[in-house]
Image (cartoon, rainbow, N blue to C red):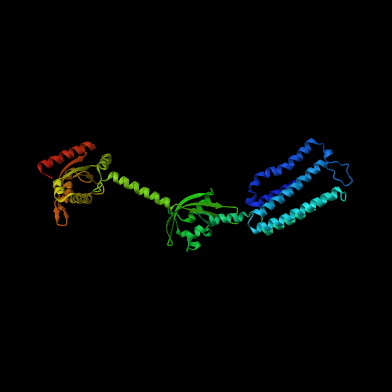
Amino acid sequence: MLLFVICFLVHLCILMGGSATQHLKRRLPIIYAAPFTLWLIFLMTMDHKQLYNVDITDGRSPLDPLFLLMTLLFVAGYILLSAVILSVTWYRTKEQKVKKASRSLLLGLFSLFAWFVLVTLMLQSMLINTRYSMILYFVGYLMWAVVLRHQIGKYHIMPDYRKLFHILFKSAPTAIMLLDRQGIVRELNPKAKRWFEGIKAEEIPQHIEFNNGIRLPEVLASLDQQREGTTHWEMRVDSDRMDHVDLIMNLDLVEGLNEELFVMHLTDVTSLKNTERKLLESEQEYKHLALHDSLTDLYNRAAMEEYLERKIAQHDMFALVLIDLDNFKPVNDTYGHLIGDLYLKHIARIFKDMSGPNDLAARMGGDEFVLIISCAEVSEAEVDEFINQRLSLLSMHSFRNENTEIPITYSSGVSIYPSDASNVTQLLKIADEAMYKAKRTGRA
């Protein structure tokens, strides 16, 4: 028991030293093991009657002299080691509270050491017997323990883990909130206070918007039912005092307290979300460019052929109209390419206006365009009239730019699915042949 208390004394001094004695913590197993290892060696190598001589009744110690000497050396050595550790702590620390505590403990250790020496001398001088020496040893330890308990309470020399956790809570880079089961905020760290500055604690849940549209009390209720640790949510915070913020929320249910609380960790991912949104916008833009003509913003040939395949798979009747502008080259030569581009954009707007929800307008390239017109609600006998009515808008809307007016003339060819052909290649071929026939005969 004596050896264990002395080992614990060294351990306590190392803990009190903090960073100054941090390296000694690795030696604690050796400090505890050394005296007990020696004690076991004595027990294994010497007869128990030799270690403890029951025949000695004259007041001297019944312990073997060598065993007693080694025990006293360990006790004295560990007390001195504790004193050295406290001295190093006192010298290196800059905190006045730790200096005062170290000085007080040093005085207590020296007093304890002096008491042990005094009792041992009295025992060896046969002024007291072994029984009384043990009592005096115990009284000395008891008095020292009372003083130590007083010093711990006075100077708070043991590590204050509540203070450490409070520091972590205050200095955390993420926003942390403690909420009760009703979603009322009980505590916020500085990061969360900056985000919700000017908002009352009971109103904070109203400024939290989850991406799936549910409310904070519903989230807390679901976590309370699951009781499966941490739950992750994407959410937003909107406030008059700050811009839109995207957050990832980690929610933990904390049990074992007087009441169940939820710990909410909020991580700002606004920059990541903005990058994600930009990537999505870029992807959509690339897809748009891949499927659209850069000048007119009509669909290009690849998109048109893909759309034709889908229309054929639906087995609904439609008309493929191939349109070639007449005299477009003279327009470029006479008015310049800028006017020529505006002329093509004007025609593209007309195509968009004349297209229904199930139709498609595309530019094949140069001055050649394609219209895919759904005829599902038109009888086959009415198809020609239906198409001519659509195309008449081209003749009705001449191109005008300042004092320049250019009429729109064109040649067109039509193929009907499924009466003319049942695949993309044949439909385009039939419409192309019909268009060039019309161009040669001078008919639109």
Q: Is residue 378 above or below residue 240?
A: above
Q: How many marks?
A: 0
Determine whether, in the image, residue 199 is placed left or right of residue 404: right
Q: Looking at the figure, which quarter contains the C terminus?
A: top left
Across and down, in percent, residue 102 comes to: 69, 55
Determine whether, in the image, residue 400 is placed left or right of residue 128: left
Q: Residue furthest left?
A: 441
In the depicted view, which residue is nearer to us: 334 or 104? 104
Q: Is residue 399 above or below residue 42?
A: below
Q: Is residue 158 at all visible to an observer of this figure?
A: no
Across and down, in percent, residue 312 comes to: 26, 39
Tell me where residue 44 sits by quadrant: top right
Tell me where residue 35 sits by quadrant: top right
Determine whether, in the image, residue 30 is placed left or right of residue 286: right
In the depicted view, which residue is nearer to us: 249 or 388? 249
Q: Residue at x 16, y 55 (%)?
A: 400
Q: Is residue 76 above or below residue 101?
A: above
In the depicted view, which residue is nearer to us: 411 or 36? 36
Q: Residue at x 78, y 38 (%)?
A: 42
Across and down, in percent, residue 403 comes to: 14, 57
Q: Residue furthest front?
A: 91
Q: Is residue 306 at all visible to an observer of this figure?
A: yes
Q: Residue furthest right?
A: 58
In the depicted view, which residue is nearer to us: 24 or 174? 24
Across and down, in percent, residue 228 comes to: 53, 48
